[in-house]
């Protein structure tokens, strides 16, 4: 009997079934994984699976590794027949093909995720209908407001508007000039004042534009 076939005698017992499965799959499994994969086909209970795996590991037919509280089991590589060059080439080709398939599937998943994201961010037909209705109401309201303004008897004439704008520019210019003069005067006083600027303003009772959230309009 060759080294690769050593182990429990062939048959339907749990140890023979598990040993054959682990050698055929040749990858690590937890007891829960093995139980889930073989339960339906062989009707093995979880306790029987755990016991058979531990027995195979103790007998050296399989390997056991612990990761924290969980154990994984896998076929003893030294007991498996060595693959020939032809078989290795077949396996390499299979790996390459599967890797390409995985990459294609990942690319397809990314495209589907992007499409799903676009669909989720798009408005449904019902949402668009409600939005259109709201816009129609807004348009009607603005149209009504515009008509009231056009029909009002106290409309501002272009001449009156120009006069108001000119006066605003004049007042802002004067405001800016006086503010500059006051700032220069206060800076001169503060040069010899022993306390802070804030304390000086509080003692004298000076209130600034900033205290009242007033902003001087920009010069036009």
Image: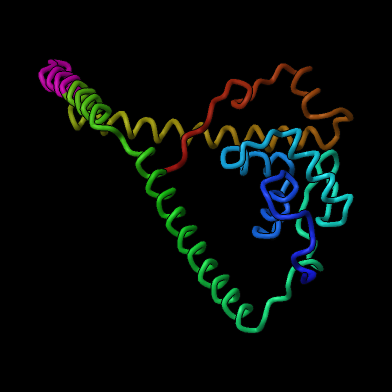
Q: Is residue 174 above or below residue 4?
A: above
Q: Main secondary structure of the magenta part?
A: helix
Magenta region, residue range: 140-154
Which image quadrant is residue 121 in? top left
Which residue of the protein is positioned furthest toward the bottom in this rendering? 85
Rendered image coloring scheme: rainbow
Determine whether 136 is above or below 58 in the image.
above
Q: Is residue 75 left or right of residue 117?
A: right
Find residue 128 and report its horizontal and vertical position in percent: 24, 31
Q: Which quarter of the image is occupied by the C terminus?
A: top left
In the image, is residue 159 above or below residue 82? above
Q: Which is nearer the eye, 67 or 150?
A: 67
Whether residue 212 appears in magenta in the rendering, the answer is no
Q: How many marks?
A: 0
Q: Which residue is drawn at 84% across and 44% down?
A: 54
Residue at 77% of width from left, 70% of height from top? 1
């Amino acid at each position: 009997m060759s080294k690769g076939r050593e182990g429990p005698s062939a048959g339907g017992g749990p140890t023979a079934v598990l040993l054959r499965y682990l050698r055929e799959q040749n990858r690590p499994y937890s007891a829960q994984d093995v139980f889930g994969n073989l339960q339906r086909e062989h009707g093995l209970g979880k306790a029987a699976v755990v016991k058979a795996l531990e027995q195979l590991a103790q007998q050296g037919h399989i390997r056991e590794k612990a990761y924290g509280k969980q154990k994984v089991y896998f076929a003893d590589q030294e007991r498996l027949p060595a693959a020939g060059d032809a078989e290795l080439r077949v396996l390499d080709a299979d790996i390459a093909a599967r890797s390409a398939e995985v990459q294609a599937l990942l690319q397809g998943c990314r495209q589907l995720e992007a499409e799903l994201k676009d669909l989720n961010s798009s408005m449904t037909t019902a949402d668009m209908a409600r939005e259109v209705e709201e816009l129609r109401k807004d348009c009607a309201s603005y149209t009504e407001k515009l008509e009231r303004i056009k029909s009002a008897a106290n409309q501002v004439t272009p001449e009156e508007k120009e006069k108001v704008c000119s006066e605003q520019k004049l007042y802002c210019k004067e405001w800016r000039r006086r503010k500059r003069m006051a700032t220069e005067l206060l800076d001169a006083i503060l040069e010899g004042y022993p306390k802070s600027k804030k304390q000086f303003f509080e003692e004298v009772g000076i209130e600034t534009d900033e205290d009242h959230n007033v902003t001087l309009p920009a010069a036009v």
